[in-house]
Image (cartoon, rainbow, N blue to C red):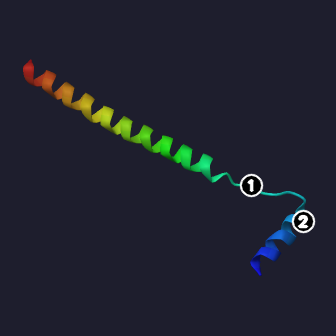
Amino acid sequence: MCKGKNNALVEQSGSSLNIDVTKIVKYVCIAGVLIVSIVFGTMCYLKIMNKDRELD
């Protein structure tokens, strides 16, 4: 029922919408890895700076 309505709209507009889920998943995973690495790197940097202050 809904498929017919969607196909009719595509035929009227003359364009189609292609969604590539694999690219979406790939870029979401890459973004997640970058966020985790930034947070982890920042925490390690802060720990190193705190240890340097304690030694002085």
Q: Going from the N terminus, do you reach mark 1 or mark 2 first?
A: 2
The N terminus: image quadrant: bottom right
Farthest residue in the left direction? 55
Residue at 26% across / 28% down in the picture? 45
Q: Is residue 23 left or right of residue 16?
A: left
Farthest residue in the top direction? 56
Label number found at residue 31: none
Residue at 87% across / 71% down in the picture? 8
23 and 39: which is toward the camera: 23
Q: Quadrant of residue 16?
A: bottom right
Q: Quadrant of residue 41?
A: top left
Query: For the residue labelled by badge 1, is the local secondary structure a helix, a strand or a loop?
Result: loop
The location of residue 23, given as percent across then percent down, is 61, 46
Q: Give the CA separation, mark 1 to mark 2.
A: 14 Å
Farthest residue in the bottom direction? 1
The location of residue 50, given as percent across then percent down, is 16, 28
Residue at 20% across / 26% down in the picture? 48
Query: Is disc 2 surrounded by few (<14), some (14 to 19) or many (20+) residues within 10 Å?
Result: few
The location of residue 36, given as percent across then percent down, is 37, 41
Label number found at residue 18: 1
Q: Is residue 1 left or right of residue 14?
A: left
Q: Quadrant of residue 7?
A: bottom right
Query: Is disc 1 surrounded by few (<14), some (14 to 19) or many (20+) residues within 10 Å?
Result: few
Q: Is residue 16 above or below residue 37?
A: below
Q: Which residue is mark 2?
A: 11
Q: Check disc 2 and give the amino acid type.
A: Glu
Q: Is residue 11 above or below residue 1?
A: above
The C terminus: image quadrant: top left
Q: Check disc 1 and give the amino acid type.
A: Asn
Residue at 52% across / 47% down in the picture? 28
